[in-house]
Image (spheres, rainbow, N blue to C red):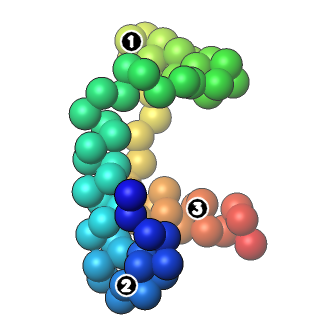
Amino acid sequence: MIALDALHQLPLKEKLFVMEALWDDISQDASGLPVPQWHQEVLDERETKVAEGTARYIDWEIAKREILEAVK
């Protein structure tokens, strides 16, 4: 087992590398991950909008800016 203390000692760049490797491993079989009901409802709603052609897409930089402004 990996000692968590060892992770705390890693530089940020290595922590990010470990985090990315973990996510890649976990996401290989995401079917086993539980999805809360509220989240499934949001996903279903978005999928419906895409199918109906009413989905709205914006540039990622604009989206990030809107998110930052919303949480201020």
Number of the front mark, 3 or 2: 2
The numbered mark at residue 66 is 3
Of residues 38 and 50, the one nearer the viewer is: 38
- Please determine whether, in this image, residue 20 is positioned above or below residue 43: below
Q: Rounded to the nearest whole Å, what is the CA distance between mark 3 and mark 1?
A: 25 Å
Amino acid on which the number 1 mark rests in the picture = Ala
Quadrant position of the C terminus in the picture: bottom right
Residue 11, can we see it? yes
Q: Which residue is mark 1?
A: 51
- Work out whether mark 3 precedes mark 1 in sequence or the reverse, and give the earlier one: 1
Of residues 65 and 20, the one nearer the viewer is: 20
Q: Secondary structure at mark 2?
A: loop
Number of the front mark, 1 or 2: 2
Residue 17, x across and y down, in percent: 27, 69
Residue 34, x across and y down, in percent: 54, 24
View extreme (front): residue: 1
Of residues 8 and 12, the one nearer the viewer is: 8
Amino acid on which the number 3 mark rests in the picture = Glu
- Work out whether mark 1 precedes mark 2 in sequence or the reverse, and give the earlier one: 2
Q: Rounded to the nearest whole Å, what is the CA distance between mark 3 and mark 2?
A: 33 Å
